[in-house]
Image: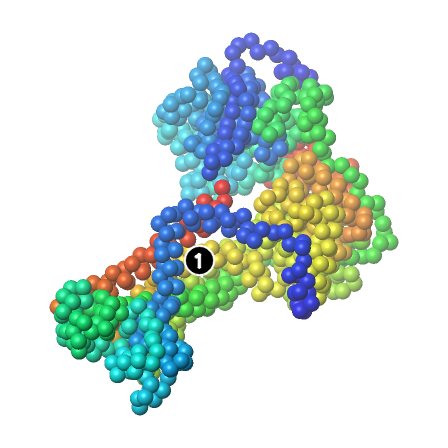
Amino acid sequence: MSDVTLDKVAKSPVSKRPRISPLNQRRWSNFKANRRGYWSFWIFLFLFFFTLCAEFIANDRPILVSYKGELLAPVFVDYPEEKFGGFLPVTDYRDPVNIEEIEANGWMLWPPIRYSYQTVNADVPRPAPSPPTWRLSTEEACRKFPDGVNDAQCNYGNWNWLGTDDQARDVVARLIYGFRISVLFGLVLTALSAVIGVSAGAVQGYYGGWVDLIFQRFIEIWTSIPLLYLLIIVASVLPPGFWILLSIMLLFSWTGFVGIVRAEFLRARNFEYVNAARALGVSNGTIMFRHLLPNAMVATLTFMPFILSGSITALTSLDFLGFGLPPGSPSLGELLKQGQNNLQAPWLGLMGFVVISVMLSLLIFIGEAVRDAFDPRKTFE
Amino acid sequence: MRSTLARLSSDPPMTEPLLKVEDLSVTFTAAGTTTHAVRNISFDINKGETVALVGESGSGKSVSALSVLKLLPYPPASHPSGRIVFEGQDLLTASERELRGVRGNDVTMIFQEPMTSLNPLHTIERQIGEILSLHGHLGEDGGHSRIIELLNQVGIRDPEKRLGAFPHQLSGGQRQRVMIAMSLANEPKLLIADEPTTALDVTVQAQILELLNKLKADKGLSMLFITHDLGIVRKFADRVCVMTQGEIVETGATADIFDNPQHDYTKHLLAAEPKGEPPAHDENAEIIMQGDDIKVWFPIKKGFMRKTVDHVKAVDGIDLKLRAGQTLGVVGESGSGKTTLGLALTRMISSQGKIAFVGKDIDSYSFNEMKPLRSEMQIVFQDPYGSLSPRMSVAEIIAEGLHIHKPGQTFEQIDATVSSVLEEVGLDPETRHRYPHEFSGGQRQRMAIARAMVLEPKFVMLDEPTSALDMSVQAQVVELLLRLQEQRNLAYLFISHDLKVVRALANEVIVMRLGKVVEQGPSRQIFDEPRDDYTKALMAAAFDLATAPAGIVNQ
C-alpha cells in the first residue's frame, strides 16, 4: 500500500468499528471475572515494570550528580574519575573520598538502594554472608563506618535490608535484577518459541500428508536429545551467556507449541470458509495467517503463561546446577545454590524461594485466567 | 387423501386427549438475560392422531417437543407456566423417577440426526436391547426375537444378518429405521418425531414417512411431528399447529389450514415455495464451461506397500456444457458425486478429462496458474454458518477477494465496492463492520453471494446454497440469484438435492447417481416427462413424497 492510501485510511471517517470486537470484550470480562488471575496480572505487571527500572532503584551510582555547577547523569554515562580529581577510568561513587569531593562541590541523588547486583559491600558488619540489617542493632550495622552510628553514610540506602550473599553483594539488589532477567529470559524464549513452534505446527497441519509425517518423525527424534548434556557440552566450548543459553533452550522449547497448533490447523483446514478463501484465489500463506492462525491462537495463548513459567524454571534450575548464566549474573538459581551452601544464612535460600514461588504462582494464576477468558464454552453461549 | 383427512379431523375427541399441553412456557436464563423460547402454548394430541408443529428455525418447536419429556437442560431452562398432562399425569411436576418410566416406554422420540443419535460403539442388537431391558421387556431369549421382529417392522432387510452391524455400516435411512425400531420397542402410545427426515435424501424420506404412516395405522400410535416442511405436513398430519417466535399462531385441521389460512404468518409460510422462472434456453450464448469425460477417482490403497487396489469413482465420465446466462442444475442423492463434480470443474480438486473455461483448457493448470481465473469462477457454499470466517467483519470478508484480484485500489474504492455489492444482494451497507454471527442464516448466505459477486465472475458454482435455510428465506435467495443472473449474464452450476429449488432456477438438468449421469436434458423435459426409472422415483419422492418400488432407489 502506498503512503497516500495509508494516509487516507487514517483520515477516513467510515471506520465505525468498535476498537475491541465484541468477542474480545467478552473475553476481557471473562478474564476479569477470575479475580485471582486478574489481580495476579496487575501485580505481575507492576513487578515487571518496577524491575525494568532496576537501575533507578538499586544502583551503585547516583541517578543525578551536581558537581561544580555541572549536572551529570552517572546512570547513563561512565565518567572518568579524573573529573572528580581521581585517577581511575570509571568513577566509584561509593568511594568515601569521591563522596566527600562531590558533596563538597554539589550534591548527589541516590537510588533508594545504593547497591547494584554486583556491587561488593566492603563495609559488611559481619563476614559475608552478612545477615539482614534489621536483625542487627544500629551500632553493629554501622560498625565499619568511620564515625560509627553518627556517620552520614550509615543510612537506609547503604543498609543490606535482606543481608548479603557469600560475596558480600546485596540480596535485595540481586533479587530485583534477578527477577528482571528471569522474566525477560522467559518472555523472549516464549515469544521466539511461539513464533517458531506456531509456524512449524501451522505448516504441518495445513499441508498434512508427507510434510506432516516427516516433520513429526523429526520432532520425535529431536526431542529425544537430552538438553542438559547438550548444555554441558556447549558450555565447555562457548562462553555461557544470556543469548547463547537462550538459543540452546530455544532449539528444544519450540516443539511444545507444534502439537496444539498442528491439531488446530488439521481441524480447521477443511472448514468451509477456508475452502471459500481458496476459491477466491487466496494464497496458502494468507489463508494460514488470516483464516487459520486466529483459531490456533486461542490454544497458543492459553498455553503461553505455562510455557513462560516453564522457561523461567528451566533457567533457574540451570543456574542452580551451574550451567546457566555466567558467574556474577544476578540469577535466582545461583541465589538458591548459595542458600544451599550457606545453611547458616537462611535469608539466602528463603528469599530465593519466596521470589521464585511468588513469580511462578502469579504466572500460573494469570494462565488460569487466560484459559478462562478463551474458553469457548464461556465465550460463545 | 383429502377424504381421509376430513374423516380424521372431523372425528370428535370422545375421550380425554392422550397428551394435553396447557399454557406451556419455556425460558432460558443465561448470564443474566432471559430468553422466552416458548410463550403460553396449548395443544392436544388424541389417540391415533398425528399433530404437526410447523415453524421456521428458532420458532421454538423443538424446545416445545423436548419439554414434553423434560429433556431440556435444566436449570438454564425453566417453565414459568404450564401443564403437560399425559394420561392424567402432569409430567412437568413428575419426579425424575416417574419421568424415566414414561421416557422410552409410553412416550418415545426420534431425532433429526441419525448419525449422532446412535451410539457408534454399540451394535444394532445392543442398542435396541438396551431400551428393552431398561423397561423390563427383554423376554426369555434376551430380546433376540423381539429385536428381529422390530427390525422387520421397520423394513430392514435380512434383520438376522444386520444384528451385529455398527451404525457406521448402515446408510442414513437404515439408521433412522433403527432409531424408529428403538422408539417402537416398548409399544409407546406417543411418538415424538423431531424433524426425522430432514437429514435424509428425498427418496429415503419418502420411505421413512411411509413407514411411520403404516406404523401409525397398525398400532394406533399418536404422533407429535415437528417439521419445517409443509409438504410433509400436508400429507401426513391430521392437525397442524403453526408456531412462530415461541407462540402457536394458528391451530386447525390440516386441510383447513392449507385451504383457508387465517393468520398472516401461515399465509406467508404457505406462499414461501420457491418461485421464479429459469432463464430461457439459448443455444447461441457463449460457452463458459465445458467438460468432457470428467473423472474424479479416489484410489483405495491396501497393504503394506499402499498399492492401489481399486478406486472410488466419485465422478465417472461426465460431459457437460454451460453457456453464459444459463443454469445447469445437478441433482442427485447424497454421495452421488454432485459436489465433487463442481469442485473438479472449479479445479479445487484434481480430476481427469478436459475442462475448458471460456475457451481455455484449464485442466492442466496449477494452483498458481488458476489464480487469475479465480475471480471469474466463484463458489457459494452450502452452509452459511461455516463459510464465513467468524473472526472477520463482513467488509473484510467481502473485500478479501478484491485485495487479490484488483490490487492497488484505495481504501475508499474498496469500501465503496463492498457497500454497493451489499446493497445489490439486499443487505444494509451500514452493517458491513459487524461480524457474521450477528446475522441470520439468510443474511449470511447473502453475504456469501456478495463475496462471490464482488469479483464480477462469469461462472458461479452454487453448492446447495439454499438447503440450510428456512423455506421463506430459500425463496428470497432463489429470487436474488435469478435477479443477479439476469443483470450480470452469469452462468450457474446449481448443485442441489432439493428439486423444487432446481426447478425454479435451472433450465438444464443433470441427474447423477453414483458418479454417472442417469439423465440429462432441458429441465422442463426432466421434470415433466422423466424417462429413467430413477429420475421418476426421485421426482415422485420430491414432489409427492411417494415411494418407489424396491430396487430402484437405495434404502
Q: Quadrant of residue A326?
A: bottom left
Q: Is residue A147 left or right of residue A293?
A: left
Camera-side residue: B351 or A114? A114
Q: Nearer the viewer, residue B307 or A170?
A: A170
Q: Is residue A76 left or right of residue A266?
A: left
Say which chain tag 1 marks.
A
Of A342 and B342, which appears nearest the observer? A342
Judged from this view, the residue extending furthest toward the right is: B284
The secondary structure type at the circle numbered 1 is helix
Q: Residue at x 70, y 56 (%)?
A: B415
Q: Residue at x 78, y 45 (%)?
A: B483
Residue found 75% across the figure and 60% down from its top: B357
Residue B106 visible in the displayed image: yes
Observer-nearest residue: B299 or B159?
B299
Q: Is residue B193 visible?
A: no
**Above or below: residue A276 compared with residue B18:** below
Q: Which quadrant: the N terminus of chain A? A: bottom right
Circle 1 crowding by C-alpha within 10 Å: few under 14, some 14–19, many from 20? some
Q: Which amino acid type is shown beneath numbered disc 1?
A: Leu
Residue drawn 68% across the image and 26% down it? B266
Q: How many marks?
A: 1
Residue B179 lies left or right of residue B365; in this view the side is left
Q: Position of residue B185 (x, y in %)?
A: 45, 27
Question: What percent of the width, then of the height, locates residue B230?
Answer: 66, 29
Which residue lies under the disc numbered 1? A301
